[in-house]
Structure formats: C-alpha cells, structure tokens
Amino acid sequence: MSSMLTKPTRVAFTIFGIIGVASVMLLVLGRISRLSTIAGAHSTMSTTRMHRILCYGDSLTAGTSGFNEEYPYAPYLEAKLRETRGDNVMVRYRGLPGWTTEHMVEDLDGERTGLRSALRKDLSLVILLAGTNDMGYGKSADEITANLKLLHNVCLDYGVPKTLAIGIPPSGYQSQNEAAAALAS
C-alpha cells in the first residue's frame, strides 16, 4: 500500500499521527499533575519520586505506520513529560499490532505480550489504547467495553494506582474515509 501513496500523503499521515500523539500527551500531562498532587509531591522535581508509565495496546501503541516504520507515541510522551516535569518520568510501551481486546484478555499472562508480564509494582499509570481492531472485526461495543474494563481492572488489582483509557486518535485515513471517521467517533 505504501507504494500507492504519494510522499505528500505519507507526510500528511505522519502529521495527523503527531497531532494524535500531542492529544495523548496533553491528557497524560494532566493525569501526571494530579498524580503528583495525590502522591504528596510538594517538593522540587529533583526530590520527587519517579513516575513510571506503561503504554499498552495495539498497533496504535506500537506506532506501526504501514510504511515498514514504527512511530510509537511513548518516546514522544516521555520527552514531552521530561520537558515539563523533569527527569523523574519514564515511559515504556508494549504495542501489539493486529490484536483485539479479546486477544489481550486471552493472553494476559503471556511472557512477551501479556499485560501482567508488563506490569510493575512501581508504575504510576497505565495507558490503555485498544479496541480499534475490534471495531474493524465488527465486535460489539459491549464486548469491547467488557474487555477494556477487564484490562483496567487487571492493572488496578495489581496495584497500579491509575489507568487511562485513550480513544482512537485522529488520522489521515479518517479524514479521507467517512466510514473510518464514523467508527472512530
């Protein structure tokens, strides 16, 4: 498919992807700010505890572009948070291209792909971005919601204090395809 797209179209996809990443960053910045307050972090950043964030999800988390390149949002999120919050932020990710929420639930304990194997006791926040592939396969909203709730509950049961659900970010494809735009809304 990449050979069918012109360079300006690929650039547009990249720009829309960056806009989506920026949207995620703004949401997380607000969440981290509240975490700092909740944790009692009233001192300077140098003495504040480390905030560890896990981003878990499908190809949107992995950052697959369809051009044999990956642009995960986690490194950009970490850089932006470090600009505003200091060096006490670490963002890691596990992206699973093509996976549905059902796959993620069935593989909770998978060593390389499972959510539980990615969780750590010192995580401040887990960002879950999943469900896009489910919609493409025609899964019901109830099924997707139940699986997402289960994934969030796994994190909370493990001791992660906060989880954040991210919706489908805007994309160049959505701007060109009405059906995709309707699915995302």
Image: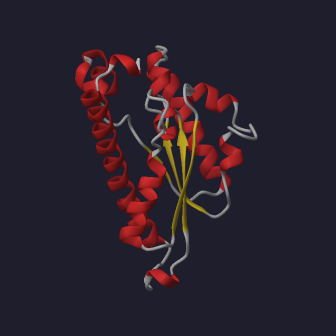
Residue 86, x across and y down, in percent: 43, 74
On screen, 9 above or below 87?
above
Q: Give the position of the N terminus as an image quadrant.
A: top left
At which x and y percent is residue 57?
53, 38
Q: Relative to residue 31, is residue 70 drawn left or right?
A: right
Left or right: residue 44 compared with residue 18: right
Count of residue discs:
0
Quadrant including the C terminus: top left
Report x, y in % for residue 67: 44, 28
Q: Which of the 4 image quadrants contains residue 35?
A: bottom left
Residue drawn at point x = 45 percent, y = 42 percent: 71
Residue at the image position 65 percent from the left and 42 percent from the top: 115
Q: Is residue 40 above or below residue 118?
A: below
177 to the left or right of 28: left
Q: Nearer the viewer, residue 111 or 126?
A: 111
| Residue under the image location 36 percent in, 46 percent down | 21
Q: Quadrant of residue 15?
A: top left
> Which image quadrant for residue 34?
bottom left
* Colour mapping: secondary structure
In front of the other: 114 or 143: 114
Work out whether 133 lies above or below 84. above
